[in-house]
Image: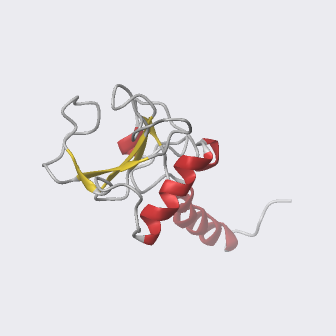
Amino acid sequence: MTPPRAFLPRLVACLLLALPAGCSSGGEDGGGVPAWARGMPVAEVSELPGEARRTLRLIDEGGPFPYERDGSVFGDFEGLLPRHERGYYREYTVPTPGSDDRGARRIVTGRNGETYSTDDHYASFTAVPR
């Protein structure tokens, strides 16, 4: 059944208004990956080891952190993260079971909410959208 002529312009207007709401926004691509995470491996928080999830909770709560260097500036001297001014990134230790020191695992956060995980002391990063 064809809608009455008077209804068609309203239907078209509603569809046009609804279209942007269904498109990606907030710097995300069609797959839901934020712009800052493009081109790198991506993991959900639930896919991280328990120690990393606990570190994320501490970050969200503002500490207290178990290591003195937690929350210090991360310089990204390796150049693997999107380029920003010094002080933009902060690093936090992810405890490594059985390690006598801080180990190689870290969470790095950006000022705008970006979250990255590394298991190999900054040799590679995984983006963790939250």
Residue sitting at the far right: 1
Indicate left or right for 107 with 68 as reference.
right
Residue occupying the point 55% across, 58% down = 19
Give the image location of residue 64, x and y in percent.
41, 68
Residue sitting at the far front: 100
Residue occupying the point 47% across, 63% down = 58
Residue sitting at the far left: 85
Q: Quadrant of residue 36?
A: top left
Q: Quadrant of residue 71?
A: bottom left
Give the image location of residue 63, x and y in percent.
41, 68
Indicate left or right for 30 with 120 as reference.
right
Looking at the rendered image, the quarter that the N terminus falls into is bottom right
Indicate left or right for 119 with 91 as reference.
right
Q: Quadrant of residue 54?
A: bottom right
Residue occupying the point 40% across, 39% down = 101
From the viewer's side, name the closer residue of 100 and 15.
100
Give the image location of residue 21, x and y in percent.
53, 62
Say if 41 sits above or below 17 in the image. Answer: above
Say if 105 sits above or below 124 in the image. Answer: below
Residue occupying the point 33% across, 31% down = 122
Indicate left or right for 67 with 50 as reference.
left
Say if 32 sits above or below 126 in the image. Answer: below
